[in-house]
Image (tube, grey):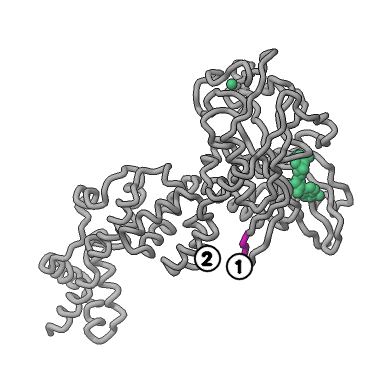
Amino acid sequence: MPYEAVIGLEVHVQLKTASKLFCSCPNQFGDAPNTNVCEVCTALPGSLPVPNHQAIHYAVLVGLATHCAINQASVFARKNYFYPDLPNGYQISQFDKPLCEHGFVPITVNNTTKKIGITRIHMESDAGKNIHVPAENASFVDLNRAGTPLVEIVSEPDLRSAQEAVAYLKTLYGIVTYLGVCDGNMEEGSFRCDANVSIRPVGQTTLGTRTELKNVNSFRNVQRAIEVEIARQQDVLDDGDTVIQETRLYDAQHNTTQAMRSKEEAHDYRYFPEPDLIPITITDQEMAAWRAEIPELPHLRQQRFMAMTDLPEPEAEILVQNKAIADFFEEAAKLANPRKVANFILGPLSRFANEAAKPLDPRLWSMTPSHLAELVEVVDAGTISTKIANDIFADLLTTGKSPKDYIAEHALAQISDSTELESLVRECMANNPKETESLRAGKTKLMGFFVGQIMRATKGKANPGLVNSLVQKIINEH
Ligand code: ADP
Ligand code: MG
Ligand code: ZN
């Protein structure tokens, strides 16, 4: 039976505030365990939360950029559950009066643009982290992350494929990094997602039973996890069984999903309004000021880059996928031909990132925008060929050397000395008498053979135009 997939995503975005959501501890990743903690975020009796205004500000920016209605009066709620990394025994979240509701973001897949509904965006504080050390047969709790401000962005079940889900995620990722409210570090968990997946026979309007996939922490894994879960549900239904509503864990290594626990319902959490906090109120002045802060968002920036480079949409999209790479491109494109700059980003730079399974993020390498512009310049000037530029690209990225210095150090400059090249061509012809004869007899296809030989002999350093004319010249000598 043909099935249709239905997907809704819950995206958790860590807000890049200086301090935590309800205390003044630093909101910082990577410090020694339990050093960024106080009586509030460790829930000592009698401590009281104080809301972080900057976090509310950032959350409203996310709501505005996703076309949400902002509830200028909004309420925090307790979500009660027990887990060792949650010292309060409840998470401060929002329930029936979230900060933002009823928004949308546009996504483009296969040249078709579609609006994905946003049900709600609410604020909540993150839990700590349990660290399990099997070798010591022990578990530890690190509360540094406890109390970190998050927004949870809940989508409508509007997505119909893994590809659409990834496009939606990338769109959101672009928005929060452009707004500067999230550092976008997916490996550290600053932007993470749970995927709700169900399937139904094509034509059916009611929703099928969903499973919720946890632990999907890269765009690629989101795609794979959803695909493999859709296939699993199809097998279940085809076998005449029913899908069980549950939380499943994606195992990236084996590319499977495994049942983790049965799905809890909202009433399991015994939500009630947080008695230690008064409602959030946002003034009209704040709304106006924050609205004015929304920068050029990826969608519009992409259109501008397309005009600068003449690139088609999918390529231009890569250039704007995060603000850091877009800024990197834009800075280099001020100093050199924008299209050529873009070609290096889309070619060798993207390959490098892909091979390392890293995002296209200039913070992960040492090349500066002006070095990239310099590389375009030395290729334009004929100092090195595009091929050599591509070959040395990874080295330039990791060493942070200026292309000119690198070329000098490795003696890579193109050989444009015709005496040197001419003797190489003559030698090559002497070694390949048959081919030389045929070329002379008018088999012009063999030009390529000789140019290829010389390029190989010089490890790509010969100026191909010059080799071409030298071969021509020698052939015509007789
Ligand atoms: P919970 O916290 O219980 O998972 P939420 O309301 O926070 O509930 O999130 C539910 C998510 O699941 C939303 O993104 C919603 O679009 C999605 N969803 C709900 N029903 C289905 C379904 N049948 N199939 C796929 N996704 C669904
Ligand atoms: Mg959920
Ligand atoms: Zn604290």
Q: Which residues are magenta?
A: 107-111
Q: Which is more toward the observer, 17 or 443?
A: 17
Q: Which is more toward the observer, 460 or 429?
A: 460
Instruction: Report the image quarter containing ligand 3.
Output: top right
The residue singled out by tag 1 in the image is 111
In the rendered image of this protein, does residue 105 appear above or below residue 44? Answer: below
Q: Residue at x 45, y 53 (%)?
A: 326
Q: Quadrant of the N terminus?
A: bottom right
Check disc 1 and report its element: helix, strand or loop: loop
- Can the viewer see residue 197 in this picture? no
**Label 2 vs label 1: CA separation?**
8 Å
Q: Residue at x 16, y 65 (%)?
A: 416
The residue singled out by tag 2 in the image is 313
In the rendered image of this protein, does residue 174 appear above or below residue 300? Answer: above
Contact between marks 2 and 1 (CB within 8 A): the answer is: yes
Q: Is residue 32 left or right of residue 428?
A: right
**Amino acid type, label 1:** Asn
Q: Residue at x 26, y 59 (%)?
A: 459
- Can the viewer see residue 153 in this picture? yes
Q: Quadrant of residue 37?
A: top right
